[in-house]
Amino acid sequence: MPPPESLDRAAVAREAGRAAATCDSVADLTREIGDELLSRVAYFDLAPRTVLDLGAGTGHASRALRARFRAARVIALDLSIAMLAIAARQARWPRRFDRIAGDACALPLRSGSIDLVYCSLALPSFANLDAALAEIRRAMTPRGLFLFSALGPDTLRELRESWAAADSAVHVHDFVDMHDLGSALTRAGFAEPVLDVEHYVRQFESLAALAAALRAAGARNAHAARPRGLTTRRRREALAQAYESRRERGGLPATFEVVYGAAFAGEPRAARPDGEFVVSLDKLLTR
């Protein structure tokens, strides 16, 4: 597991803000993973009063969650105000939802106020995973469900290994593997965690095309130990040569390992309650 605070929080927020206007243009894989996670909602008998889309970005999943759970209060929470501004512009009735700028490690939500937390691919951006998971569980109702996807350690392995041929610096984030993530959920007090792994491979015409896609998605290196100076020409050439040796018929491969998971905050929900619920946002927020 990455050590606590392995990411630079300010850099994570800065990159998310910069990518707000471009992330949707390179969101094919992100949408595919998010939609797969959304499909897994059907595995559970849920009628949540409050739903949190954690790391909501531009609100694609928030809109889908609002359409699925029409009686629920849906909250889109993201570190980036710029992302939430785009989410607000794209929201349409009946898919409107509340938007809150906040940090997963210090959620501005009352304890026991959220029935369903949906979190797709945001876990790797949490500077302190244990602190974030503890906060998520604190905000959930005793029978709440945490449904998530996260990037695993095989993600961008081709890029990581190619950089290793150029220098020994940290150029690619650390990602938590499925077993360590399961242990972290248990430490945070979650019950009955279930996890599985899928691998996705995308092809890029060039290393520059891969770098442009990562930059547009707001996925540039924000590791606290990242190099801060300019990369020398010699190192860039060593990187390019190492990655080029991996070229396949369709282009340069980039692997993305995705961990899908679900865990209850406490006892699983036994029965589906009837009726519609209207929850005031003021009752959910801390002051």
Image (spheres, rainbow, N blue to C red):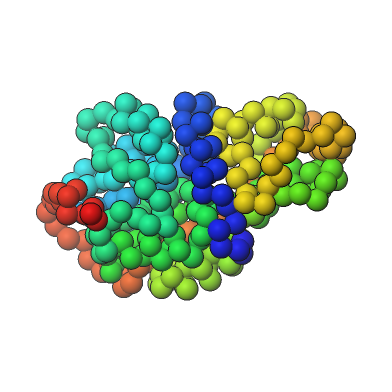
- Give the residue drawn at x 40%, y 32%: 82
Left or right: residue 39 versus residue 4 is left
- Give the residue drawn at x 26%, y 41%: 98
| Residue 260 in picture, x, y percent from top left | 51, 55
Which residue of the protein is positioned furthest toward the front in this rendering?
229
Q: Is residue 9 above or below residue 5?
A: above
Left or right: residue 32 versus residue 171 is left
**Can residue 273 be seen in the rendering of this structure?**
yes
Quarter of image, res 177 = bottom right
| Residue 54 in picture, x, y percent from top left | 39, 49
User: For the N terminus, which image quadrant?
Assistant: bottom right
- Give the residue drawn at x 30%, y 54%: 108
User: For the C terminus, which image quadrant?
Assistant: bottom left
Quarter of image, res 141 = bottom left
- Give the residue drawn at x 53%, y 37%: 15
Q: Nearer the viewer, residue 141 or 203?
A: 141
| Residue 191 in picture, x, y percent from top left | 40, 72
Q: Nearer the viewer, residue 133 or 47?
A: 133
**Can residue 150 be seen in the rendering of this structure?**
no
Q: How many marks?
A: 0
Q: Nearer the viewer, residue 41 or 228?
A: 228
| Residue 239 in picture, x, y percent from top left | 82, 38
